[in-house]
Image (spheres, rainbow, N blue to C red):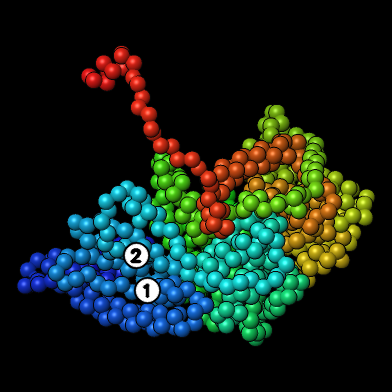
């Protein structure tokens, strides 16, 4: 039995046995009996721990009732101290509780149904009579209940959709705002953090990508919210502090009562070190907010990681409940057809996906962007006979990268000729280090930000470019393509285009976003062997838009219901007239 438990833990289940329910063992005659005796001894220790957690839960409930401003649900205010009473001694039961890495608790009793009850983002199974399918579905869905703050917002100068989303995130306590670029996530997270600080008296930490920290400090000053840019631990001040993701290891997370992840797409990879660091550090943080652009409709891992960070449900639990493996590929997950609507309803209970203020019923005319013009510049390169008899377009990733290296000098020369002929501010994206070095040498007065540069150099030059102090900035989308506002630049060039449409889209939206008053021109430089790059990007854009609209159609009603309390009006069909069947059908029906 012990070997079995260890094997389960090694497989990643990470379960602890709370109560075995095996009583009255006369003697250990077999290996199984000896295992059960050992298991019972361990359960005695765990019962003592359960009593300790129950006492902590009662103390938290008393504190919650005395404050009046935080949710009166005990489990909501003590999310990592949840304890449940064991089953009666006369019944056989088997309880499983997460070990801190898993937010869920389960209770199974033979001969009875199971119902899930969610308290403040933490789920427990309780005994219930499953008499109807609707109750069974409600139990399986596990809608996340509020565990946050219901307090009025100060006047932060927010738009209507921003106020709705901020109030909803405060009521949730732990929430994710998946709002498209330019919808004002910075202001929403600042209003959320300031309200949590005022209502709880606890300090708040905001984590942001490089250079976004100083940008957020300036945004906070514009709406009357003081934010301290804490580059080191010694700079922390009471109130709201912000730092970069790469400095998180220097901070003690326990001193903060709330945490905000700006551009939380950094946790999209479930095996990444950043995700595990954030899970470990902020597991016990009462209030959490994750803000990023709308995730890809088929990127289930990103949704699962957000749910796990918020303490709603682990990624493994989400996949097991709503997904199946697609064919023989164990790395590909497919959403169950019958679970599609229920899945997006569950997501909408803790994450709001908004592409436009119109999604929440508000006027979106202020967010109509100026025209975007994409131009392709094709560089002709001579055919290399070593690559075959005829010149062929690159097909594989390796072939495309080789084609880019062969055309590097010509593409850089073509780009530099256009940039040097104007006095406009330019944002130039490259894909290879050699491209960046060649562009910096070919364009006088340009500044390149590369991975080899130190953080101070990167931050200083990014801020200078955002303020219009630098005419030409050269960098990669992976370094500067997320979270930054570069409306000062209306001209952009891609001297190297990656195969990631998300990276391309985010890079374009640094300039083409809310606040941009001029048409944005994007120039893509590619060789004749790279194929129709712009056509391929446009195809991916159409596909992404179609998938996003499909997702919006499934989530819109749920998001509106959660955020603003609106539901779609429907006319229920009530049959009042009997159908008269033809004679030939009556004979078939009778048979």
Per the model, the C-alpha gap separating discs 1 and 2 is 10 Å
Q: Determine the image quadrant of residue 73.
A: bottom left
Relative placement, left or right, of 62 versus 293 is left
Kindly check if marks 1 and 2 are in contact, taking CB atoms under 8 A apart as contact: yes
What secondary structure is marked by label 1? Answer: loop
Image spot of residue 567 (x, y percent): 53, 50
Q: Determine the image quadrant of residue 468.
A: bottom right
Label 1 crowding class (10 Å Cα cut-off): few <14, some 14-19, many 20+?
A: many
- Position of 489 relative to 381 (above/below): below
According to the picture, the residue beneath numbered tag 1 turns out to be: 82
According to the picture, the residue beneath numbered tag 2 turns out to be: 124
Q: Nearer the viewer, residue 507 or 421?
A: 507
Residue drawn at x 41%, y 83% is 62
Name the mark on residue 410.
none
Residue drawn at x 32%, y 48% is 133
Q: Quadrant of the C terminus?
A: top left
Upstream in the sequence, badge 1 or badge 2?
1
What secondary structure is marked by label 2? Answer: strand
Please say whether residue 268 is visible from this viewpoint.
Answer: no
Label 2 crowding class (10 Å Cα cut-off): few <14, some 14-19, many 20+?
A: many
Image spot of residue 582 (x, y percent): 34, 16
Please say whether residue 141 is visible from this viewpoint.
Answer: yes
Image spot of residue 334 (x, y percent): 45, 44
- Position of 370 relative to 57 (above/below): above
Residue drawn at x 43%, y 58% is 143
Callout count = 2
Q: Nearer the viewer, residue 202 or 460?
A: 202
């Amino acid at each position: 039995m012990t070997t079995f438990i260890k094997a389960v833990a090694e497989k990643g289940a990470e379960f602890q046995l709370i109560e075995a329910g095996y009583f009255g063992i006369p003697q250990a005659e077999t290996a199984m009996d000896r295992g059960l005796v050992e298991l019972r001894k361990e359960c005695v220790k765990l019962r003592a721990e359960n009593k300790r957690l129950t006492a902590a839960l009662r103390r938290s409930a008393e504190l919650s009732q005395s404050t009046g401003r935080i949710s009166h649900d005990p489990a909501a205010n003590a999310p990592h101290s949840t304890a449940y009473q064991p089953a009666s001694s006369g019944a056989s039961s088997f309880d499983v509780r997460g070990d801190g890495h898993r937010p869920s608790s389960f209770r199974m009793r033979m001969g009875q149904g199971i119902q899930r009850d969610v308290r403040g983002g933490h789920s427990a199974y309780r005994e219930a009579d499953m008499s109807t399918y609707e109750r069974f579905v409600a139990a399986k869905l596990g809608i996340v209940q509020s565990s946050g703050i219901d307090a009025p917002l100060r006047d932060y100068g927010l738009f209507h959709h921003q106020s709705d989303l901020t109030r909803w995130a405060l009521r949730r306590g732990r929430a994710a705002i998946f709002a498209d670029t330019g919808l004002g996530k910075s202001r929403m997270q600042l209003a959320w953090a300031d309200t949590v600080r005022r209502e709880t008296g606890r300090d708040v930490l905001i984590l942001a990508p490089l250079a976004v920290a100083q940008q957020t400090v300036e945004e906070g000053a514009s709406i009357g919210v003081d934010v301290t840019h804490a580059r080191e631990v010694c700079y922390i001040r009471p109130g709201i502090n912000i730092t970069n993701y790469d400095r998180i290891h220097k901070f003690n997370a326990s001193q903060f009562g709330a945490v905000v992840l700006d551009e939380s797409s950094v946790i999209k990879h479930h095996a990444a070190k950043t995700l595990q660091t954030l899970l470990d550090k902020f597991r016990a943080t009462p209030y959490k907010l994750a803000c990023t652009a709308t995730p890809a409709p088929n990127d289930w891992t990103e949704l699962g990681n957000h749910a796990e960070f918020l303490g709603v449900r682990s990624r493994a639990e989400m996949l097991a409940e709503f997904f199946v493996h697609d064919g023989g590929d164990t790395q590909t997950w497919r959403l169950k057809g019958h679970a599609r609507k229920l899945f997006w309803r569950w997501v909408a209970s803790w994450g709001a996906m908004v592409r436009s203020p119109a999604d929440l019923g508000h006027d979106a005319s202020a967010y109509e962007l100026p025209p975007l013009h994409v131009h392709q510049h094709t560089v002709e390169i001579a055919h290399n006979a070593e690559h075959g008899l005829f010149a062929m377009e690159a097909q594989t990733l390796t072939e495309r990268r080789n084609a880019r290296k062969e055309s590097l000098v010509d593409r850089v020369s073509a780009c530099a000729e256009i940039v040097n002929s104007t006095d406009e501010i330019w944002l130039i994206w490259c894909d290879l280090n050699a491209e960046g070095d060649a562009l910096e040498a070919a364009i006088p007065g340009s500044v390149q930000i590369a991975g080899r540069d130190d953080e101070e150099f990167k931050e200083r030059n990014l801020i200078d470019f955002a303020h219009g102090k630098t005419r030409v900035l050269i960098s990669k989308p992976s370094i500067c393509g997320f979270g930054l506002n570069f409306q000062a630049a209306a001209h952009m060039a891609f001297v190297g285009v990656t195969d990631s449409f998300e990276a391309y889209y985010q890079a374009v939206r640094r300039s083409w976003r809310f606040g941009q008053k001029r048409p944005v021109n994007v120039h893509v430089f590619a060789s004749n062997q790279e194929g129709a790059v712009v056509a391929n990007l446009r195809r991916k854009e159409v596909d992404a838009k179609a998938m996003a609209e499909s997702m919006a159609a499934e989530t819109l009603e749920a998001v509106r219901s959660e955020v603003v309390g609106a539901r779609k009006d429907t006319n229920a069909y009530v049959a009042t007239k009997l159908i008269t069947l033809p004679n030939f059908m009556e004979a078939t029906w009778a048979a």
